[in-house]
Amino acid sequence: MSDASTKAITIALDAMGGDHGTDSVVPAAVAALDRHPDLSIILVGDHDTLVACLANVHVAESDRLRIHHASQTVGMDEPPAQALRGKKDSSMRVAINLVKEGVAKAAVSAGNTGALMAISRFVLKMLPGIERPAIISAIPSTTGHTHMLDLGANVDCEAEHLLQFALMGSELARAVEGVENPRVGLLNIGEEDIKGNANVKEAAKLIAASPLNYIGYVEGNDVFAGGVDVVVCDGFVGNVALKSSEGVAKMISNGLREEFRRNWLTMIAGLIAYPVLKRMRTRFDPRRYNGASLLGLRGIVIKSHGGADALAFGNAIDIAVKEVHKSVPSRIEERISALLAKPDRTQAEPADQ
Amino acid sequence: MSDASTKAITIALDAMGGDHGTDSVVPAAVAALDRHPDLSIILVGDHDTLVACLANVHVAESDRLRIHHASQTVGMDEPPAQALRGKKDSSMRVAINLVKEGVAKAAVSAGNTGALMAISRFVLKMLPGIERPAIISAIPSTTGHTHMLDLGANVDCEAEHLLQFALMGSELARAVEGVENPRVGLLNIGEEDIKGNANVKEAAKLIAASPLNYIGYVEGNDVFAGGVDVVVCDGFVGNVALKSSEGVAKMISNGLREEFRRNWLTMIAGLIAYPVLKRMRTRFDPRRYNGASLLGLRGIVIKSHGGADALAFGNAIDIAVKEVHKSVPSRIEERISALLAKPDRTQAEPADQ
């Protein structure tokens, strides 16, 4: 797997998932093939629908763009347990099966997060030494971006899980960003007498004792200030922080639009400032950050936002391609086995299980 | 207390607290007296320093602006227990004592949050039926603002505490905003299989069963979207959400400045757009939102941001004045005793204790 970066790769796309299904996925796939000459894509979903979609965009099936039929679709609000047990031929499940079978190196889906997590975990299994998957994503910062995990996979985390997140997040940042020694921070609050809850304090000790480049506690505002590469937190807190930050960005963006539309003078000012405002919008465009990785699995699974359009879904594909080239899961596996050094657990779960 | 809105009121200011101490507090006090003809202020702190500060701004001591000497100051990083036990003549403690003694109707401090919490709780005591104080603040939203609590006083909260926060927050919003039936939401995450942790789910049941106008779960982005008046969460999550939103706002504001300073063309565009950008900055100026209330106490204590300048500290004073006029603690007490109806607890803690 270490020479993956020189080989052609194949990824599987859940073509039916998300709010827009094939309308986002098919054009995103076609564009991604142009961007990545070494990439092949398997579109997983209803065969007839996909044939019609390709005809609509005047693209023919080829060696690089194949259709793999799946007869079912996981609904966006479907309970994960039901999706896991009742829909064994869903486009989501089949895409992940292709990763399990080695036909594809990664799966990308804009479908229901809970179902994607449950199915990925069931089909692919966890890496040895990792107890829970975590959702990680890049988030824009003043100086570039920050990786943050967990963003919603785990509501209640123990200190040991936060350490595992730190290890996985650090290795992901090393692999995809090329940062040699990523700065890892633990999300906490700064109120003086209550600095952190018991789990966070305990996790701080564990992470500080690891060989990671641990820079200590960071607060919510630090995530965006650019002084940290990987921010570790439990999934409840991470999800709230992510959604809050999206909410603020949207509020400010709406506010700007409103202020520039106030009267004809402000509208003229808006026209003159348009190129600058557009650059700004591009810089913080959430679509450019679409694509969260489900870390800790024996395979690469990327979750796209459910509402992703073709541009946003394309970004999730790019993340999948990058993680395949960098062999992220095997790097995490090596790092964990070297660092955690827990003979009882790693021997109980041999790598070829 | 119900006719407080027609009477002159006195508030005590911890003049030595915060990063800027008297430099923020004294000018803020002078300006507040101009804004509120019914207001008197007691500046609590080192007498000689305060005399010199007043001389600097050419203001004389008067009936409406008195100095009350306190020989000690609580440090911004001082452990709360040490501030509570070791500094009985601190400006913070003395200001709160004045509230306890009925000399002042409210205290405002920009000092160390943990110490302010510990001292307020020790000196003023909790309202009957409330187990823990909570920090609440208004946060800007697309349609105005949202009140959010707890913002950092309580790291681990049980469902019952979240219910108490909901009751207090709703009553505060009713009192200071004049909203008859504030919409109360419980902060949660939307991942499908893991919707909320056990505490949040239990709290949802309790709040839904109360007479509050409970609108259900809200997510991080909803805080800023304007569809909810009071957002309830534990202090860890609330603090992270608040700080994250501040971080994003700052990042965007810095990004805009950077983009407009890119070259002479963008600078001209920036000059033309300046009035609009300035309106925008004013609209979301965090100083206009400075001032968080410590709810659940038998008295009014307002926490100003430590870094507050005179304008920001003035906003915290305005919040104190408003809460005094609206008799917030007694309204909360009445609401709680009517709603919670826990004879065992309320009888054990008579209101005059």
Image (cartoon, coloured by chain):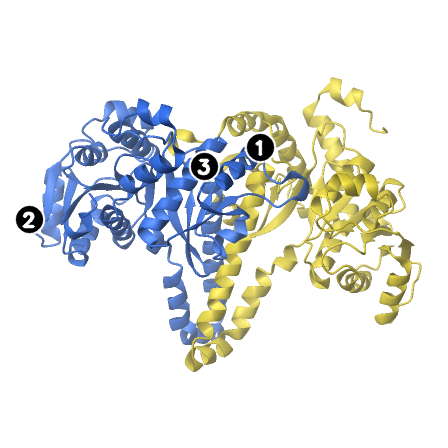
Chain colours: A yellow, B blue
Q: Chain of mark 2?
A: B
- Which element type, helix, strand or loop, lies under badge 2? loop
Image quarter in which the C terminus of chain A is found: top right
- Which element type, helix, strand or loop, lies under badge 3? helix
Q: How many marks?
A: 3
- Which element type, helix, strand or loop, lies under badge 1? helix
Q: Is residue A153 visible?
A: yes
| Residue A70 - label | none
Q: Nearer the viewer, mark 1 or mark 2?
A: 1
Q: Are marks 1 and 2 in contact (CB under 8 Å)?
A: no
User: What amino acid is labelled 3 in the image?
Assistant: Leu
Image quarter in which the N terminus of chain A is found: top right
| Residue B198 - label | 1
Q: Is residue A123 left or right of residue A219?
A: right
Disc 2 crowd, CA 10 A, few/some/many (<14, 14-19, 20+): few
What distance separates the C-alpha of mark 1 from that of mark 3? 14 Å
Residue A164, placed above or below residue B211: above
Residue pointed to by mark 3: B163
